Image (cartoon, rainbow, N blue to C red):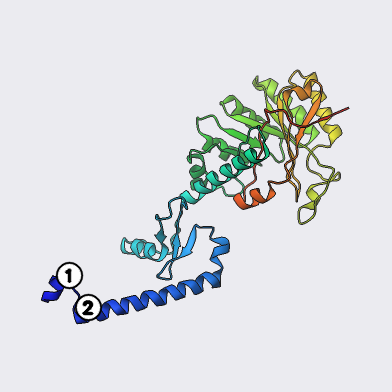
Amino acid sequence: MSDDMSMGLPSSAGEHGVLRSMQEVAMSSQEASKMLRTYNIAWWGNNYYDVNELGHISVCPDPDVPEARVDLAQLVKTREAQGQRLPALFCFPQILQHRLRSINAAFKRARESYGYNGDYFLVYPIKVNQHRRVIESLIHSGEPLGLEAGSKAELMAVLAHAGMTRSVIVCNGYKDREYIRLALIGEKMGHKVYLVIEKMSEIAIVLDEAERLNVVPRLGVRARLASQGSGKWQSSGGEKSKFGLAATQVLQLVETLREAGVSTACNCCTSTSVRRWRIFAISPRAFVNPRVSMWNCTSWASIYSASTSAAVWAWTMKAPVRSLTAP
């Protein structure tokens, strides 16, 4: 080692090395800018993915902590040095947890902006991704979260992940007697299991199984909107839609529950449209008068699509809302 180097000063050769290093960084920066434009990362990276000064893809699992970034190329080299065989899958559960916090924060801002005093509860449909790590990352995020099942297999998976803690579970889709019985068993286990009625034939089975298991069911109803949107899923709306109950059927359901002595069992109602997300709620008083309370949320579609690709659920409303008195 030369004297000048021992003093912390670069030698002539060292100076050339520093200059070459600076040139390489400059070239890499230009290449990184080109990659950003080529792959349009600014439009889909959403602060999670970026190109660093070396031209490598970097991951920021939590944008609230921007200094915590991972160089994917360096990560691969590190894993190879540790004996990891490629290809390998790298998971960043922090991204899921940040998305969950983001959508809850978005709806909180919307509720404050529109003066909505009701409750909001996010429900994750596991058909989006049934991977164990995904579901567990969401459940253990510390954010309020429910799970939605659309089949018997999904319901079994949801009950397995829900564990011993009280969880909110929403049951949609085709329901046979086994599906309904399994959902009611989940209710007896201490979970809040909502069976969403989509066909009038389902209610008789629900009441029969509930009596056998000696449990009061939690019911919801999917309302069929008369209005129809446009686009790929326009057939899921309108009076001729095969999904949900028409207005007259909802009133028939109310009367059936009243006769069975469980008029307060149904306390939520949902319906979706293509361009407009309508959020309904049926209060327990609705089955006394009967009255259907409706809050039309037309301005959350952009918030919804910007926050998550998973379906969301507006839970039972506690605050007084606009009312439509049924005949």
The tag on residue 306 is: none
Of the 4 image quadrants, the one containing the N terminus is: bottom left
Q: Which sits in the foreground, 226 or 52?
A: 52
Q: Residue, x 54% and y 58% (percent of image)?
A: 46
Q: Position of residue 102 (x, y in %)?
A: 55, 46
Q: Residue, x 59% and y 33% (percent of image)?
A: 168
| Res 123 seen here | no
The tag on residue 14 is: 2
* Number of other residues with Cα within 10 Å of mark 2, as a class: few under 14, some 14 to 19, many 20 or more: few
Camera-side mark, 1 or 2? 1
Q: Residue, x 56% and y 35% (percent of image)?
A: 159
Mark 1 or mark 2, which has the lower sequence index? Answer: 1
Residue 253 lies in quadrant = top right
Q: Which sits in the foreground, 263 or 325?
A: 325
**60 versus 322 height, above or below:** below
Q: Farthest residue to the right: give it.
A: 327
Secondary element at image label 2: helix
Q: Position of residue 88 (x, y in %)?
A: 43, 61
**286 versus 153 height, above or below:** above
Of the 4 image quadrants, the one containing the C terminus is: top right
Q: Position of residue 306 (x, y in %)?
A: 62, 52
Q: Measure the alpha-carbon separation of dots 1 and 2.
A: 11 Å
**Disc 1 marks which amino acid?**
Gly
Q: Position of residue 235 (x, y in %)?
A: 81, 51
Secondary element at image label 1: loop
Q: Farthest residue to the top: give it.
A: 261
Q: Residue, x 14% and y 75% (percent of image)?
A: 4
The tag on residue 8 is: 1
* Number of other residues with Cα within 10 Å of mark 1, as a class: few under 14, some 14 to 19, many 20 or more: few
